[in-house]
Amino acid sequence: MTGVDTRQPTPDRIMHIANGYWATGILGAAAGHAIFTHLEAGAGTAAELAVRADISERGAQTLLDGLLGLGLVELHDGRYRNTAESSTYLVEGRPTSLSEFAKLKMTHMGSLADLSEVVRAGGPIRNATVEVADNPHWEKVVTAIAAQSTPVTAIVADLLGLADAGEISILDLGGGSGIFSAAWLGLNPAARSTQLDWGPINAIARRLVAERGVADRFTCVDGDFHHTEVATAAYDVVVYSHVAHQEGPDDNTALFAKVRAALKPGGTLVVCDYVVDDDRSGPSFALIFAGEMLLKSKHGGTWRRSDYRDWLVKAGFEDVTFHPTPSPTTVVLAR
Ligand SMILES: C[S@@+](CC[C@H](N)C(=O)[O-])C[C@H]1O[C@@H](n2cnc3c(N)ncnc32)[C@H](O)[C@@H]1O
């Protein structure tokens, strides 16, 4: 009898990966036309979505087919609806919504064509995005990624008991949208926070923090965190979130030493990043993200737990712990 040998590998996964940009495109276009928001509000067919999103019915059906193929919508009795995941993470206006991030990623697709050359060169072949002072790149990125940090702010607040910590002083290096300050000042009415970032980014953070009604306890310092002085023994908590991956080993060690001096005795450094296992066997998001840093930074990468531990110990920290979260971000606490 002849038949398909199920022990043979199939090309299916490789076809999906080679065409991975289809997924970025379908998700980005669906987010751009607020498809998940319209589905949540009750639209359930291509015809209904076409009217609500002001797009063609053929386009709406194509997006729905693609989203079903990607597992981002469900189909029941001829009507589409969001999966639980899409409802939580892709409907606009929710604190965890990644819809802006999905739209932003559409604009990053072209730069990936440089990756072969970048791999040969060992670093960026155009401007090294993250080393350019005041790069407008960040203005688009920081609001788009704020939602990624929202669940992490809650996890760290629990780990450190921040809500009941009283009059604490927080410093956020490269705080971006101000999401950590906004969340923690909201939880703890006696806390104060300072963010050190580029001027135009701090302007964005001031807006978000003001929207949350806690701007009176939020201060910004404009500048480069490598060179701007920070007060000594002044902070209970210092945050360094989604920044370590853009820096090389020497800069991370120097920044950790600067943070050690800025912390009060017993204070905690909170690093949030995509951390790789010591034997480089996972996790998969952190392993894959390294390509983004090869493309955009001269010295960045995704670093192993042992790298963080070495740099932190060199910088004077004694107690280093790792806390994986349900997102791709791992929290590193150092005291
Ligand atoms: C990937 S974003 C992370 C934002 C935020 N910490 C978060 O987790 O959502 C990196 C941030 O670091 C800031 N940044 C990068 N290099 C910097 C530098 N040399 N000095 C000050 N800020 C910098 C960027 O402006 C941006 O706000």
Image (cartoon, rainbow, N blue to C red):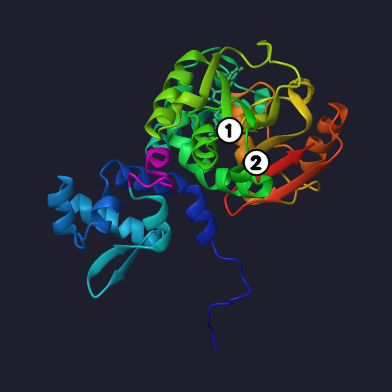
**Figure quarter occupied by ligand 1:** top right
Most foreground residue, 1 or 29: 29
Q: Residue at x 73, y 25 (%)?
A: 248
> Vertically, is 7 above or below 126?
below
* Amino acid type assigned to the residue bearing label 2 in the image: Ala
Q: CA distance from mark 1 to mark 2?
A: 8 Å
Task: Indicate left or right for 137 with 66 as reference.
Answer: right
- Identify the residue under disc 2: 165
- Identify the residue under disc 1: 191
Packing grade of label 2 (10 A; few <14, some 14-19, many >=20) is some
Q: Which numbered disc, 1 or 2, marks the residue that appears first in the sequence? A: 2
Badges 1 and 2: C-beta atoms under 8 Å apart? yes
In the image, which residues are magenta? 92-102
Task: Indicate left or right for 46 with 160 as reference.
Answer: left
- Main SS of residues in magenta: loop
Query: Is residue 93 part of the magenta span, yes or no?
Result: yes
> Vertically, is 39 above or below 253?
below
How far from the left and from the top, in percent, is residue 110? 44, 31
Packing grade of label 1 (10 A; few <14, some 14-19, many >=20) is many
SS of the residue at dot 2?
loop
Q: Residue at x 62, y 45 (%)?
A: 164
